[in-house]
Image (tube, grey):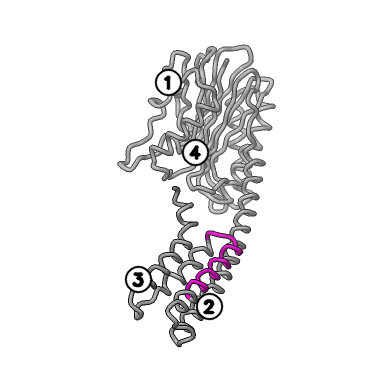
Amino acid sequence: MTVRTLARLLPALLIVGGVFYDVLTPVAFTAVPFFTAAPLVAAPLSSLRTTVLTGLASFLAVYAVHARFGYVPDADAVTELTTVATVSVLAAGINRVVRRGDQRLASAREVAEAAQRAVLPEPAERIGGFEIAARYEAAQEGTLVGGDLYAVQDTPYGVRLVVGDVRGKGMGAVAAVAVVLGAFREAAEQEASLEAVAGRLERALAREGVRRGGVDTFEGFTTAVLAELPHGEGTVRVVNRGHPPPLLLHADGTVRPVEVSEAALPLGMGELGAWPDRAAERPFPGGAALLLHTDGLSEARDAHGRFFDPERRLAGRAGTAPGALLARLAAEVRRHTGGRMADDMALLVVRRT
């Protein structure tokens, strides 16, 4: 029996327990706390009809117990009946308040889901001859929109991908996500090199920061990793802007991070210095898969503070379909953290068939 099922049965159990308590104990003892608790427990968990019926059942149970012993209508019986009736009316009111709150929450969740679908649309399963899968895992259950981002685009220069993590939370982070993704979709089509795409994202964030009045009113920087899979070539190029490196899962099951030779600052921090982007290039043969992720994966901790190790967990999974791979990986992170993830997690995997 699940906890939720037990909670729904609790009002009935309280009424039955109250009847037995009244019958089996001396007259001086009263089971009114049982009978008043029943509709109050039902109010947040059940419908209005069930709450009202629970209150009515409590009222009738009190009346039946007193009638059995011939105590109706003495003062104690009237007081207990009045108490149960009053609490039942209050429980019905509580039920309506809770239901209205649930409706507003459901409406807010629908808006959040629509916003997430608009900002982070689910990529097609096959793009440019590659198998693709993406997954967004919010740290808090029921929270959908955050600062992690991903995008995939087929361009004249190959399939281009980006995964990033905006500093901060809230609507400011969502606005920065929209800016980065909008700039990426445009630049990926127009720029001949991945380095130039990164430069366009840098300038887009800088313009938006000036327009909004600086870092205090707009998210100041975004870590990001960009990848390019040229058509007809078994290679992958990667530009990293202060982000966890992608993981290359080879057909033999080995996993290697794709490190760049020179580190660059995150997007939006160009004013601190100019570090030219230099793409790292690696072989990307048939059967290999590339995983781009945010630090919600690599920095997930268990109860003892141990980090989740994606390289070890991915080893030997070369033949797994991208969607199944991400689903399994997300489930393992949840188990590792005991369901208490500290940060959102965006995952994007592309596999050459």
Q: Earlier in the sequence, mark 4 or mark 3?
A: 3
Q: Which residues are magenta?
A: 45-62
Q: Foreground residue, 179 or 66?
A: 66
Q: Are marks 4 and 3 in contact (CB under 8 Å)?
A: no
Q: Main secondary structure of the magenta part?
A: helix
Say whether residue 53 is magenta.
yes
Residues at marks 3 and 2, CA–CA distance in whole angstroms: 26 Å
What residue is shown at x 55% (from left), y 59% (from top)?
A: 46
Which of the two marks, 1 or 3, is nearer to us in this view? 3
Q: Which mark is residue 279?
A: none
**Quadrant placement of the C terminus:** top right
Write down the residue under mark 2: 86
Write down the residue under mark 3: 24
Question: In the image, is 37 to the left or to the right of 199?
Answer: left
How busy is the neighbourhood of tag 1: few (under 14 within 10 Å), some, or many (20 plus)?
some
Q: Earlier in the sequence, mark 1 or mark 4?
A: 1
Q: Secondary structure at mark 2?
A: helix
Residue 150 picture location, percent across and down: 58, 34
Q: Amino acid at mark 1?
A: Arg
Which of the two marks, 1 or 4, is nearer to us in this view? 4
Q: Foreground residue, 144 or 188?
A: 144
Which of the two marks, 4 or 2, is nearer to us in this view? 2
Q: Earlier in the sequence, mark 1 or mark 3?
A: 3
Q: Amino acid at mark 3?
A: Leu
Write down the residue under mark 1: 256
| Callout count | 4
Write down the residue under mark 4: 345
Residues at marks 1 and 4, CA–CA distance in whole angstroms: 20 Å
